[in-house]
Image (cartoon, rainbow, N blue to C red):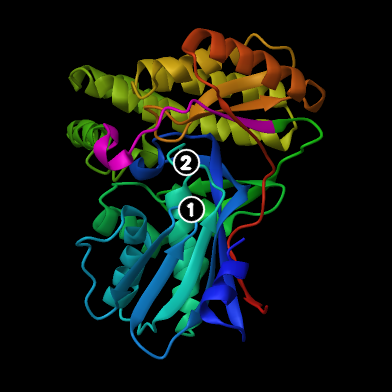
Amino acid sequence: MPEREFFKRYGSGEAFRSRAPGRVNLIGEHTDYNGGFVLPAAVDRDIRIAFRPSEDRTVELHSLDFNETARFELSKLERGAMPAWARYPMGVAAVLQAEGFALRGLRGVVKGDVPLGAGLSSSAAFEAASALAFCRAGEIELPRERLARICQRAENEFVGANCGIMDQYASLLGRRACALLIDCETLSHRTYPFNETLARIVVLDTRVKRTLVGSAYNQRRSECEQALAILRRHAPELKSYHDLGVAMFKAFAHDLPEPLVRRARHVVTENGRVKEAVKALQSWNMVTFGALMDASHDSLKNDFEVSCRELDILVNLAREVRGVYGSRMTGAGFGGCTVTLVEPKHVEEFIRTVSSGYRAQTGLEAGVHVFTPSEGASVESIRP
């Protein structure tokens, strides 16, 4: 927790703590930036900032995870020699000011337990926690939906990752014991109860790190845009993949060259899988939900080509274990994590069997996380 270090550095007196969770996406991958549907859940791991507003325009943040201190002036936001982690709060500050909000400086200490570079949205959690801190310091009140868009814009424009809206939405709007269905075209959302007596969410980290900015993520987004532009020749009314159903896609797919046809096919079929997964969740049909997860991974591997050897090994091992409903990669891919739904009584066996098999095939030790769907971001007063 960052509170102890904060009071040690900056003295006693009233202060605040903002926190924002990471997220795991149950199904709906690479659909958010295509105006599609996603079904994430906020998780019980978060980024926390203990902070106090200042009377000047200086922001000073010390990261306990990196043992670094970053300082920047709100009147002169330049990435320059800033540590990479500091670009997230700086980007949020830049967008808030660009949208007309007057910010105050602050002093703070940051600590998180969202695994970094694993596809669990530590960046979005940091952005959301930063946004709440700046808003509390400046006495700014904004709807969570707008804060999510501000955080997304910060990552797109300031950090350079062309991400969709899902991660920030899940971090700010998640609900305890629920999955969150997000329509990324209309930005509407709805929560659905997740029954942990039927299934537990187990995330396994390949320990293969990837950086979204430097990966093929932006290339995949560009390919989806190219495919949609070609499909619009037949259906000019299409704004995104939101209303592109399987039947329409099949009718016009002959115009799409490789690999664009496979990229578009993944997005179209994945949107359908999300809708079917919601129906399965409403009826507590975890067998069907798991089968949809399996199909999602196969599509991500073959049509979207964002899996990797280590992700495939984890998924294949998981599918052989008793009590597993389904398993898939989660996050942007090229490394990171898998998400698996497991019957509660088989969780220990699952972890033991898959961890052992993964070690034997790769020489790597998989990171293991059993997550509970948790509440979204918050801010509160703290004292020594």
Between 366 and 344, the one nearer to me in the picture: 366
Sequence-wise first label, 1 or 2: 2
Task: State left or right for residue 101 relative to residue 348.
Answer: left
User: Residue 151's x, y, as percent?
Assistant: 39, 61
Q: Residue at x 41, y 15 (%)?
A: 309
- Residue density around tag 2, few if under 14, some if 14–19, many if 20 or more, within 10 Å: many
Does the magenta-highlighted stretch encompass residue 209? yes
Judged from this view, the residue extending furthest toward the front is 8
Question: Tag 2: residue type?
Answer: Phe
User: Residue 333's x, y, as percent?
Assistant: 40, 29
| Cα separation between marks 1 and 2 | 33 Å
The magenta segment: 201-217
The residue that disc 1 covers is 65
The residue that disc 2 covers is 37
Task: State left or right for residue 64 relative to residue 165.
Answer: right
Q: In which image quadrant can residue 383 be found?
A: bottom right
Q: Residue at x 39, y 82 (%)?
A: 105
Q: Is residue 140 visible?
A: no
Q: Residue at x 48, y 72 (%)?
A: 108
Dividing the image into 4 quarters, which one contains the C terminus? Answer: bottom right
